[in-house]
Amino acid sequence: MSNTPVTVPVLDLARFDAGPADRAAFLAELRTAAHELGGFYLAGHGVDPALIEQLHGLSRRFFDLPEAEKQAIEMVHSPHFRGYTRVGWERTRGLSDWREQIDVGSERPVLAIDNDAPAWRRLQGPNQWPAALPELRQPLLRLQAELTAVSLKLAQVLAVALGQPEDAFAPLFDDSPSQLIKLIRYPGREAEDGRQGVGPHKDSGFLTFVLQTDQSGLQVETADGWVDLPPIPGTFVVNVSEQLELATDGYLRANVHQVLSPPANTDRLSIAFFLGARLDTRIPVLPLPAELAAKARGVERDPTNPLYPDVGENTLKGRLRSHPDVAQRHYADLLAAKAG
C-alpha cells in the first residue's frame, strides 16, 4: 500500500464543452496528468450507469457458470484471441496472471488471407459468445460502442491539449478502430501464494478505460512508488497507452500499472476497454509545439518487449506473448519461423 503524496486527479470531460476559461483550465489539467502520470480518473463521460451496473451483474453470472460452459468458448478455439481465459492462463512478462476473463473485440468479418498477407490480418474475426448466457451479447456490444464513442471524443480532446487540430488522430481510427472489452474476475488468494492479479505492464493500444466495482486492487507506478487507484463512483480510470507514447515521442508516456489479487475468500470484478488504432495503420509522430517537444522523453525502449509503430504487428506481438496456448494452436508457423 502506497503512502506517497501523489494524487491521481479526477477530470470532468464535460468541461471541454464549457466556457473558454473552464475549457482552457481543463486542457491544462489533462495535459499535466497525461504527461506526468500517464493516467487519471474520467468523470462526465455520459455512459449510462445502469448499463455499467447491468454488465457487472452479467459478468458475475458469466463467471458463475459451470466450467464446461465457460471453456466451451475458450480462447484457444479462436485465432482472433476472443473468448474465455482460465485463471492463470494469460501471462504478463512471462508470469501467470491470477484472473479469469472473457475477451470481446470488434464484430467484423474474417479477412481474406493469402501467402503474402501479413500475419496480423488473422486477428480480425468473430467473437465467441456463451450459449448458456445469450443475454450477454447485446448489452456488452452496446457498452463497447458507448466506450468507443467516449474514447474517440477523448482522443479529440487530447489532440487539442497537445496543440494539434481536433481531428489529428482521426486517420488512425477512421471507421474501424481496434476495440477490445474484457470482463474480468480476480479470485482471492492467500498472500503467500502471490499477489499478481495482473503483473506490471503498459497497455499496447491508444487509450484504456477501467470500470471498477467496489473492490480495489489497481495500482499505477510513479516516481514515488506504487499508488492505489480505488474505485470512485461515476468515473473510469484512464490509462495512456503505447500508441500515444509513440505519437508524442514520449511526451505522453504509457503508464505502468498492475492489479493485486484480493484477499482469500473474496473476489474482484472489473471491466476493461481498450481503444487502438486500425490494425492496418502506422503510428506517426506528431509535430508538437516547441514547448511540449522540449519535454518529450523519447519512446521508452525495452529490449525484451520492442515497440513497433506498425499497429497490426505490435498488436499481434502482444497477443502471442500473453496467450501462448493460442499462439501454439493458430500461429505455429510464426513460432517456427522465429525459432528457425
Image (spheres, grey):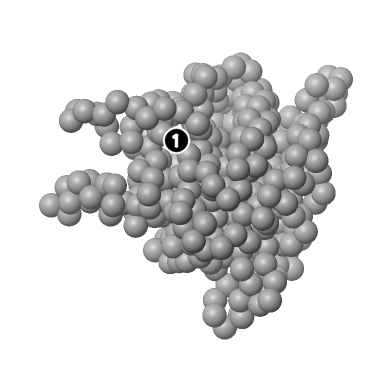
**Would you say 261 lies left or right of 121 here?**
right
Q: 172 and 68: which one is in front? A: 68
- Quarter placement of the N terminus: bottom right
Identity of the residue drawn at 72% across and 51% down: 57
In terms of image quadrants, where is residue 221?
Answer: bottom right
Q: Residues within 10 Å of mark 1 (few under 14, many from 20)?
A: some
Q: 17 and 319: which one is in front? A: 319
Please determine whether, in this image, residue 35 is positioned above or below residue 150: below
Please determine whether, in this image, residue 187 is positioned above or below residue 142: below
Q: Is residue 190 visible?
A: yes
**Would you say 299 lies left or right of 160 here?**
left
**Would you say 156 lies left or right of 23 here?**
left
Residue at the outermost left position: 340
Q: Is residue 219 visible?
A: no
**Would you say 337 lies left or right of 102 here?**
left
Q: Position of residue 34 (x, y in %)?
A: 64, 40
The amino acid at mark 1 is: Pro
Q: 110 and 269: which one is in front? A: 110
Identity of the residue drawn at 68% across and 49% down: 58
Number of marks in picture: 1
Identity of the residue drawn at 76% across and 34% down: 47
In terms of image quadrants, where is residue 170?
Answer: top right
- What residue would you read off at disc 1? 126
Q: Position of residue 63 (x, y in %)?
A: 61, 59
Identity of the residue drawn at 65% across and 42% down: 135
Q: 319 and 163: which one is in front? A: 319
